[in-house]
Image (cartoon, rainbow, N blue to C red):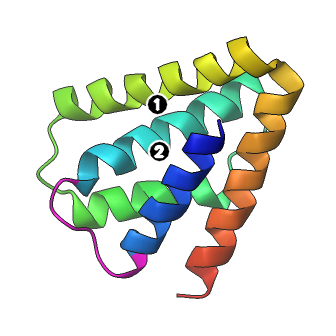
Amino acid sequence: MLKSVLALSLISTQCLAGTPKGECANLWKMYGVFMRASLICNFPESNAVRKTLTLLKKDCPKSTEAQARRYVADGFKEFDKGVASKGHPKACGEAFTSWTRLEGLRSQR
């Protein structure tokens, strides 16, 4: 999950500068991680989820539904791996920490 946090930090920094080619897949995956965490950890929808979806709509308008489903499913799998390896409370805590960091980075925008 630490890799996920670092990847999310990198992605969010790149989002601040605009979305480079190929980042749409990472944004969809990040959205999947956030959505799965929201479902599994029983978190209310966060600003990070909404902001990620807004970025996707703005920066990735050519994404097809099939592409989005594939990458969101990858995000679901990544979060599930974290739950399996670290346990539910730790994975949920890390997801919450990622959300708050991402919200902080984007609010500085």
Say which residue label 2 marks.
30
Measuring from the top left, give residue 65's x and y in whole percent.
20, 32
Q: Earlier in the sequence, mark 1 or mark 2?
A: 2
Q: Which mark is residue 41?
A: none
User: What's the magenta bit mostly, secondary-structure-wise?
Assistant: loop
**Residue 40 image offset from top left, x and y in percent:** 72, 22
Q: Place residue 14 in its image quadrant.
A: bottom left
| Residue at 57 percent of width and 54 percent of height | 6
User: Residue extending furthest top?
Assistant: 84
Name the disc covering residue 75, or none.
Answer: 1
Name the element at disc 2: helix
- Residue 92 vs 31, above or below: the answer is above
At label 2, which amino acid type do we have?
Met
Specify the amino acid type for callout 1.
Gly
Q: Residue at x 16, y 45 (%)?
A: 63
Q: Position of residue 26 (x, y in %)?
A: 34, 47
Q: Is disc 1 in contact with disc 2, using a CB cutoff of under 8 Å?
A: yes
Tell me what residue is drawn at x 29 percent, y 58 percent. Answer: 57
Q: Is residue 90 above or below residue 20?
A: above
Along the viewing direction, whichever of 95 and 66 lies nearer the viewer: 95
